[in-house]
Amino acid sequence: MSVEITDPAMMEGAPPPAAPRDEPAASSGARPLDAAGVVPGAGGPPSAGSGRSLRLVLPVLLASSAMALHWIVNVPHGDVQVNAKDQGAKGDAKSKPKPKRPPKKGFEPRPAGELDASWARFETVAFDAEPMKSAWARPHQSLLNKAITYARAQAFEGAPEEPRITVDAVECRTIRCRFVLRGPFAHEVELLSDTLSKLEVDGSSAWRSYKTAKVQPPKPDQPASDTYLEVMVAFREDNLEAEDFRVPDDDADAPRDGEAPPADDTPDDG
């Protein structure tokens, strides 16, 4: 029995083709699908974790972009000119400290001629009618207080008790000053006034004028039994120095021990 071969491949000696199978080919590279019909990792919808990361990164990216835009638009390119007056400016422009204001000058002492003219003008005028020159009055009121304090220390040096004397109503005008010495003991008030009247500066009296007068209590609530001595003075010259105040020794002309008293040059009547 003879078999006739009609297939050209078989006629050339090739092996017969394998029978077809229903299994898919493993070499095609296909990946299994998930329940949603999408291949995992193949461009499907993003997971919840990736969305959270995007929300955290996005504000940082926006802030960085805003800063970069601000730098490009507002920051000038090249060298920046620094003004020496700018706060915190550094470099060659050195800021100089502000000059200090000179201290206010006190009262300018008046020349002797002007002082004499003022005294001649107001010597006989009532004290309350004398105009007030504030530039002179303030420093000389302070000088007068220092003079009284110095005279008080000299008058009552070594006293067993502190004198009960007060100074009231100190006031200075243009060339004169006025005040009231008050105390319960008249002899204390008179001693202080007497010592103050002898005050000297550089060997000469500190006063151009020194006048006293007993007065009634300046205030209604002050005791009438106290002694009230009103003192009106005029300094010899303007701006005397309190450090130069001196009270001369009353015994300066008295003979020392072993010395004869000064001769009496008064001629005899006979």
Image: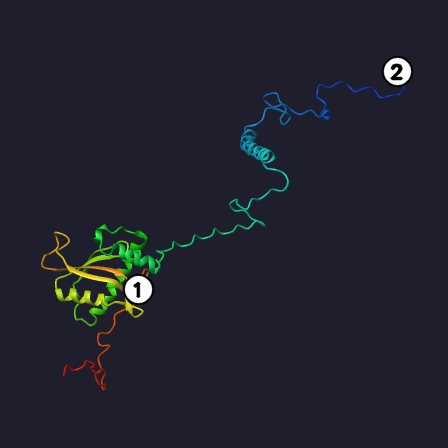
Quarter holding residue 81: top right
Quarter holding residue 270: bottom left
* Mark drawn on residue 242: 1
**Left or right: where does residue 88 sit relative to residue 3?**
left
- Cα separation between marks 1 and 2: 148 Å
Mark before the other along the chain sequence, 1 or 2:
2
For image coordinates 73% across by 19% down, the residue present is 21
Disc 2 crowd, CA 10 A, few/some/many (<14, 14-19, 20+): few
Quarter of the picture containing the N terminus is top right
Q: Is residue 66 above or below residue 246?
A: above
Residue 259: percent from the left, percent from the top? 23, 85
Q: Is residue 263 above or below residue 114?
A: below
Mark 1 vs 2: CB contact within 8 A: no
Colour theme: rainbow
**Left or right: where does residue 98 sit relative to residue 69?**
left
For image coordinates 75% across by 18% down, the residue present is 20
- Which structural element holds mark 1? helix
* Mark drawn on residue 8: 2
Residue 180: percent from the left, percent from the top? 18, 58
Q: Is residue 187 above or below residue 14?
A: below
| Along the line of sight, the residue nearer the viewer: 115 or 108 | 115
